[in-house]
Image (cartoon, grey):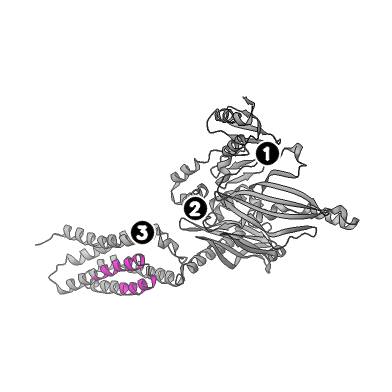
Amino acid sequence: MKINNTFKLVIAVVVSELAGIIGSVFTAPSITGWYTELVKPALNPPAWVFGPVWTTLFALMGIAAFLVWKKGLNRKDIKIALGIFIGQLVLNTLWSIIFFGLHNPGLAFVEIIFLWFAILATVIAFARISQWAVWLLAPYILWVSFAGYLNYSIWQVNAGPLANTEQVAVKTVVESFGHSLKNVSLLSPTASQDIEINYKDFLDPALLAQWKADPSKALGRLTSSPWPESIEVESINKFGSGAYDVSGKIIDMTSTGIAGSQAVQIGVVKFGGRWLITGVSVISPEGNELWKEHSSNGVSFQYPEKLTAKYVFSQGWPPTVKVESGSFSCIETPQEKSSMLEITSQRLVDNRIYCVNVKNEGAAGSVYSSYVYTTSMRGKMVSVSFVLRYSNCANYDEEQNQACTSEREAFDLDATVDRMVQTVSWDSAFSEDTLSNQISKCLVLSYSGDKEKCDELLKQITDFDSCVMAGFSILKSNPAQCQTIDGRTFVQETNSTWEQALLTVNNCEAEKAFQTHSRLVTLTLKNGNKLIAKEPQIDDIIDIIRAAESKCGKIPIGTE
């Protein structure tokens, strides 16, 4: 049967595109999965480029085959040329199966060499029949040559185990971030914009938002010289699934050469196929030597082996760190009772909010203080507890008394604990399905257009407490305020949860209660403390108090 040229063109293009469709069956699942795990060369195009490019190339192949086919199948050279063409199509599909389906870049590279020679043979065979067909195949052989380079590079850099592959990717992110530091002047009026432009590809969106809001917390250049030139990675340690801790040095340069270095610790986590920096801590040279790693019950953290203080002593060191479910609450000790042996206060340290409980006990000329610092991290509550012994400065002679008093005034315990907290990690820290982790992943994915999902998650942030648990920055204000990445600000109205309020009433600890139209309930406790929580429904507190009065006695309640 004789086929007219139009049908020949359609058949040739469809057959060519069919090879691509078969290959895509193996390619598509890996593009968003296994392929994202690979370390790629600098010239590797974004994943979305490959689809349009291959679709175009297969169409050009089909047209080239048509130009040969239309000359007639009665010629032996045409039959041979089309046979070679079909052969290279098979090899093309086979490469996708090996690389993406079998996840074997090494074998795929061997196969792509055969594919390249098959394409070259096709070009030579077509050249004897149609020069236009040769020109249509030119982009194809050039692209496969480039693909061969990519294949070889990916094979070589990912030749080790997955852990080595991940470490290479982590190192690449940190070093690339280091090279961008000199581009951001922290004292410039445009510091926030410069941080966005230069750091957005390296930082977790939550950290990026914190640095933009307060550039003084960011890394960058403070003077024209010296300037931060790079980050030299010294060690990479895995502390969870897709999470690494990187130790290194920021290299400072001048026009005459290296001016010095600063120790730095960087947390890097994988979000939706991208490795991003979640935390950065610059460490003084003397401080870095004193800090050690500790792991217990699946939780690891760093702590100072000894405190840089002469008159303050740690007891039962290292601290005890716990990671538990819950929500942030802090019932502060009233100011009029601040001289009590037990004090609870809320403190803001470097954009993080802590509830700090201190119990003091005097013995043998010293004061023993038991501390519990509690804050939210990745949707969990992290607590750090320890005991310090403070010498009584009055027991020393005048010179030592002055030294002891000066040291006590300069001793920044909050900063030391905050640095410890920043190093806390646990196996499921970044894989648990908490709102904090969901939002972090969503903000990363939103760069590629998944904004609707991100907006839905952010709608779940409705008050100060949910904002804190989601990991957003706390502003320095009174009362405390939490600001989300979409610009909303929530004022702290409560210091406890509704569940804690229920427990307090049922334990007969409440002396009286007051209720507002906005569902805020203030419980004045028998010990003088005040607990403020939000009731789920209006008048819930009335029902709870009435039920408790049978065992607790009359509990007066006022309303707005």
Q: What type is the residue that disc 1 sits on?
A: Asn
Q: What type is the residue that disc 2 sits on?
A: Glu
Which residue position holds label 2?
A: 432
Is residue 134 shown in magenta?
A: no
Q: Residues within 10 Å of mark 1 (few under 14, many from 20)?
A: few
The boundaries of the magenta stretch are 87-116
**Along the horizontal axis of the image, is 343 left or right of 64?**
right
Q: CA distance from mark 3 to mark 1?
A: 51 Å
Q: CA distance from mark 1 to mark 2?
A: 33 Å
Q: Earlier in the sequence, mark 3 or mark 2?
A: 3
From this view, report whether residue 100 is shown above or below residue 428: below
Residue drawn at 53 percent across, 59 percent down: 427
Q: Quadrant of residue 79?
A: bottom left
- Closer to us: 287 or 317: 317
Q: Quadrant of residue 87?
A: bottom left
Residue 105 is situated, as x and y percent measured from the top left of the image, at 39, 70
Residue drawn at 25 percent across, 66 percent down: 132
Q: Residues within 10 Å of mark 3 (few under 14, many from 20)?
A: few
**Along the horizontal axis of the image, is 398 left or right of 466?**
right
Q: Nearer the viewer, mark 3 or mark 2?
A: 2
Which residue position holds label 3?
A: 29
Say if mark 1 contacts mark 2, CB within 8 Å: no
Which residue position holds label 1?
A: 478
